[in-house]
Image (cartoon, helix red, strand yellow):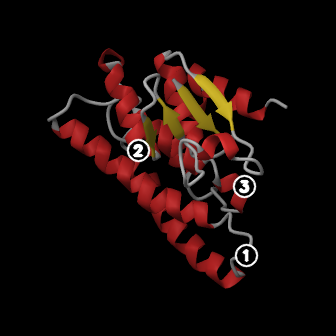
Amino acid sequence: MRLFHAPNTCSQAVYSVITELGIKCEIVKVDFANKTELLKFNPLGRVPTLVLDDGKVLTEVAAILQYLADTKPEMNLIPKAGTWERAKTIELMNYVATDLHKGIGALFNKDMPEAGKTVIKTSVHRHLAFLNTHLETNKFLAASQFTIADAYCYTIVGWTKFVGVDMAAYPNVLGYCERIGMRPAIAKVIQADNAK
């Protein structure tokens, strides 16, 4: 198995889950200036791109995370299929993908006018406020324990420090990120991503 990954991108969530599950996987760090190898497997040239040993390719964070979690159900990173808990986990994963990922991610666009960024930041703050309220009574995003939704949410919320989103008004989110960041697998990936 190979994961095409770029540090501090959404593929960090996939790398974290691979590490959490103890899956043997080659991590291929992508240089976006030269995506020749990546383009052989993903014509969009995006990460994450997961290439299985049989050559099958899977893209998109939420799909890859669900696939990986299902390969080791005993690790309980996603609730059992057909349960309410699984549906809620997928619901919150989609929330992260469509509202947080797309919103915070748009702020990386250097060509976006400041007025556009202001509008997006207003939306991002609304979603962070929702998350802050949700985390008042929930230690984890979607279940009573760490799941793939937490790996994804932690990665995306971590982008706020790169795009000038002030997190001071969201103590529950900050506490949540601190807890998730202390998990050995997450800390290992962050260290690997920040290594020169």
Residue at 64% over, 55% down: 160
What residue is shown at x 30% (from left), y 20% (from top)?
A: 73
Residue located 68% across and 63% down the image: 108
Q: As displayed, is residue 5 above or below residue 75?
A: below
Q: x, y percentage for residue 117?
A: 64, 75
Give 125 or 2, whichever is nearer the viewer: 2
Position of residue 45 in the picture relative to residue 151 (left or right)? right
| Disc 2 element | helix
| Amino acid type at image mark 2 | Ala
The answer to whether residue 162 is above or below residue 125 is above
Viewer can see residue 128: no
Residue 93 at least partly seen: yes
Relative image position of residue 113 (x, y in whole percent):
70, 82
Hey, which quadrant is residue 41 in on the image? top right
Sequence-wise, which precedes: disc 1 or disc 3? Answer: 1
User: Badge 2 is on which residue?
Assistant: 62
Q: Which residue is mark 1?
A: 111
* Other residues around mark 2 within 10 Å, as few (<14) / some (14–19) / many (≥20): some
* Dot 3: element: helix
- Residue 193 bears which disc, if any? none
Cα–Cα span, label 1 and label 3:
16 Å
Observer-nearest of 88 and 69: 69
Q: How many marks?
A: 3
Q: Amino acid at mark 3?
A: Phe
Q: Quadrant of the C terminus?
A: top right
Callout 1: SS: loop
Residue sitting farthest toward the bottom:
115
Q: Are marks 3 and 2 in contact (CB under 8 Å)?
A: no
Where residue 118 appears, as percent x and y from the top left, is: 63, 78
Q: Earlier in the sequence, mark 2 or mark 1?
A: 2
Specify the farthest residue to the left: 82
Q: Which residue is mark 3?
A: 162
